[in-house]
């Protein structure tokens, strides 16, 4: 019911400060004309042609976070893997500005600046003492991936997916990440409208990379949002 209500929200709902829509308002379900596609819109439409679409997200029992390995383990085969630093600190070090490390550590980020949070557009000062202000989001969420096929993957593939710094991980505002939960674009979009096309594109790219399907709601949102891509 929550997803159904969220899908019916109007894209133009005004949002300010730290108030987030229940699941991110979706755009009006209209199709762009063939002459209005921007570069990012063309990329979104191209990705839509490469991913599998299912009617709804199934419910597959058994999901636990540790099914995707120890949280932020360094034991993965992607960028940053086996470098002696955990994935969370790798992402903070790469995506924050003015990064400061713990004394005598080359890994532990204790301060930095998220100049423009992708999901809210806000400027956020990160301090380890209040670490939850900046969280690391899985663009294609782990619980969603479990239901969409990852339950049948080998364990190491799930570990690599959960720690894919290149494709699937973003340092973002903590409350925004909490509002997203394990939703996809069909239920949630960033309140930062300037990032919505990029977010949808990244979601589709991760889906294609890992052969994960998207829902019809995801597809419809992706098609509709192309009208607003810069």
Image: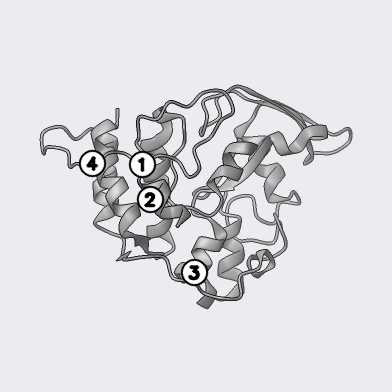
Comes first in the chain, label 2 or label 3: 3
Instruction: Pick the residue in front: 76 or 72.
Output: 72
Which residue is identified by label 2?
186
Quadrant assignment, res 132: top right
Residue name at image x 59 percent, y 58 percent: 162
Mark 4: secondary structure: helix
Image marks 2 and 1: residues in contact by CB distance under 8 Å: yes
Instruction: Pick the residue in front: 91 or 77.
Output: 91
Q: How many marks?
A: 4
Residue name at image x 55 percent, y 68 percent: 157
What whole-number distance in Å separates the C-alpha atoms at marks 1 and 3?
22 Å
**For residue 160, side relative to residue 58 (left or right):** right
**For residue 30, side relative to residue 15 (left or right):** left
| Quarter containing the N terminus | bottom left
Instruction: Pick the residue in front: 156 or 64.
Output: 64
Which residue is identified by label 4?
42
Label 2 packing within 10 angstroms: few (<14), some (14-19), many (20+): many
Comes first in the chain, label 1 or label 4: 1
Which residue is identified by label 3?
147
Q: Percent x, y for residue 138?
A: 55, 50
Residue name at image x 52 percent, y 29 percent: 120
What whole-number distance in Å separates the C-alpha atoms at marks 1 and 4?
19 Å
Of discs 1 and 4, which sits in the foreground?
1
Image marks 4 and 2: residues in contact by CB distance under 8 Å: no
Query: Compared with residue 121, is residue 198 higher up or lower down, i.e. above or below?
Result: below
Label 3 packing within 10 angstroms: few (<14), some (14-19), many (20+): some
Which residue is identified by label 1?
26
Q: Percent x, y for residue 76?
A: 64, 61
Residue name at image x 19 percent, y 41 percent: 30
Q: Percent x, y for residue 135?
A: 65, 41
What whole-number distance in Å separates the C-alpha atoms at marks 3 and 4?
29 Å
Comes first in the chain, label 4 or label 2: 4
């Amino acid at each position: 019911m929550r997803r159904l209500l969220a899908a019916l929200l109007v894209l133009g709902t005004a949002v300010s400060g730290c108030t987030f829509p229940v699941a991110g308002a979706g755009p009006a379900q209209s199709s762009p004309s063939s002459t209005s596609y921007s570069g990012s819109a063309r990329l979104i439409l191209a990705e839509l042609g490469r991913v599998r679409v299912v009617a709804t997200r199934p419910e597959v029992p058994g999901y636990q976070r540790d099914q995707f390995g120890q949280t932020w383990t360094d034991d993965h085969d992607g960028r940053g893997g086996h470098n002696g630093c955990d994935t969370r600190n790798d992402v903070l070090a790469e995506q924050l500005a003015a990064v400061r490390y713990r004394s005598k550590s080359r890994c532990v980020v204790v301060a930095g600046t998220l100049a423009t949070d992708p999901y809210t557009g806000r400027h956020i000062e990160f301090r380890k003492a209040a670490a939850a202000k900046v969280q690391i989001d899985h663009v294609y969420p782990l619980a969603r991936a479990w239901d969409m096929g990852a339950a049948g993957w080998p364990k190491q593939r799930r570990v690599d997916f959960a720690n894919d710094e290149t494709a699937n991980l973003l340092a973002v505002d903590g409350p925004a990440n909490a509002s997203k939960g394990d939703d996809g674009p069909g239920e949630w979009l960033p309140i930062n409208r300037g990032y919505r096309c990029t977010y949808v594109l990244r979601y589709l790219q991760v889906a294609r990379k890992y052969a994960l399907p998207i829902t019809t709601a995801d597809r419809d949102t992706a098609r509709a949002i192309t009208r607003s891509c810069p």
